[in-house]
Amino acid sequence: MTPPASASAPGATALTAVPRRVDVYEVGPRDGLQNELRTLSTPDKARLIEALVQAGETRIEVTSFVSPRWIPQLADADKLLALLPRRPGVTFSALVPNLKGLERAKAAGLEEAAVFLSVTESHSKKNLNKSVAEAISTAREVAQTAIKQGLRVRCYLSTVWGCPYEGKTPVPRVVEVVKQLVDCGTYQLSLGDTIGVGTPGHTAELLCEVLKLLPPSQIALHLHDTRGTALANALVGLSMGITTFDASIGGLGGCPYAPGAAGNLATEDLVYMLQEMGVETGVDLGRLVAAGELAQELIGRRLSGKYLQAALGEREKQASRVRAGA
Ligand code: HMG
Ligand code: MG
């Protein structure tokens, strides 16, 4: 049989040129806990963050300086920051929606702020009580003020693939908003699949356009796993040179102003895939499982992370074998 003209040489794959190192940006303590029914105590949040640090995570979004009326689960942001020991090489960041949030963040000694906005009008109104144009202007003002005060700033764009109120987001709409942010001084733009509707083809098409405006090092992917496509989309990003992926321990997470949004891509699932592909993350998978187990215990429910459940299941099987043999 004659092979098709496009067939690759034996052993060659589309993934031979993936980056050798990837940054995992942990959002569990923020994106995860903002959407859980159970509000953790401040010391329990600090324990979870410590477990993530012990696993080798170095970029951790620990909370939000948003209105406590909008997100009561994170109302203790100021107290939490006071409780967290700082370590060289570990950066704690938090969401900052406005200048009032920045004032609180600065007083709490935060080193990195994340401004955030949506590309769709309805989600913007629900999430920030602002139009997209107003939110762009606020994000730019907060970012520029924070940078002058010595903070590093990243920027999130929400509803990049789809919006809970408006459906699929057209790629040109995303491009239009990104163009208004490229010169705002933030070091990275994290593209959010807020409700987890992304698929590999859409992700490739979107990244093709955004990569015309920003280099891959300035783009992160923030993928929610509502429909099980987060890891597939991350793989597309990786193959297109993206080196920062947001993820959440155990797959905790969602957005309270995006009905149906589920947890983020689970950190352990991402790290497992990368490790097996020979891509370095600096994160220890065994210790990550310990952090996931702690998250599960604190939240009081089984989390959705697949690797976590497989590892815990395997451990339980081994323990039963030992019990049976004893
Ligand atoms: P607003 O009601 O329009 O605010 O909300 P305002 O400026 O009119 O102020 C109203 C009251 O809130 C005032 O208090 C302010 O002082 C207070 P009062 O005078 O009535 O007593 N206030 C604050 N208090 C503490 N900290 C602050 C603050 N700002 C105002 N920073 C606001 C506007 C932006 C505050 C509100 O909409 C808000 O906090 N929104 C945040 C919603 C949120 O956190 N959503 C989830 C995070 S986004 C996400 O999850 C998506 C992401 O993961 C990416 C993805 O998945 O796509 C990032
Ligand atoms: Mg999110």
Image (cartoon, grey):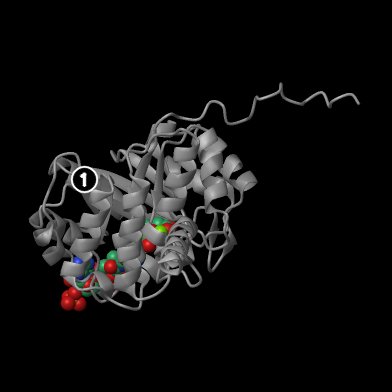
Q: Residue furthest front?
A: 326
Residue situated in front as seen by the camera: 309 or 323 = 323
Is 39 above or below relative to 211? below
Q: Position of residue 167 (x, y in %)?
A: 59, 63
Q: Position of residue 121 (x, y in %)?
A: 47, 62
Residue at position x 17%, y 69% from top? 42
Q: Residue furthest right?
A: 1
Image quadrant assignment for residue 23: top left
Q: How many marks?
A: 1
Ligand 2: image quarter: bottom left
**Label 1 crowd bin: few (<14), some (14–19), many (20+), radius 10 Å:** some
Residue at position x 12%, y 49% from top? 86
Residue situated in front as seen by the camera: 230 or 154 = 230
The amino acid marked with disc number 1 is Thr
Q: Position of residue 285 (x, y in %)?
A: 37, 48
* Secondary structure under the numbered disc 1 in the rendered image: strand
Give the side of residue 125 with respect to residue 234, left or right. left
Is 218 above or below relative to 37? above
Is residue 228 among the parts visible in the rendering? yes
Residue situated in front as seen by the camera: 248 or 98 = 248
Q: Position of residue 270 (x, y in %)?
A: 45, 48
Q: Quadrant of the N terminus?
A: top right
Question: Which residue corresponds to mark 1?
Answer: 91
Residue at position x 21%, y 50% from top? 92
Residue situated in front as seen by the camera: 325 or 79 = 325
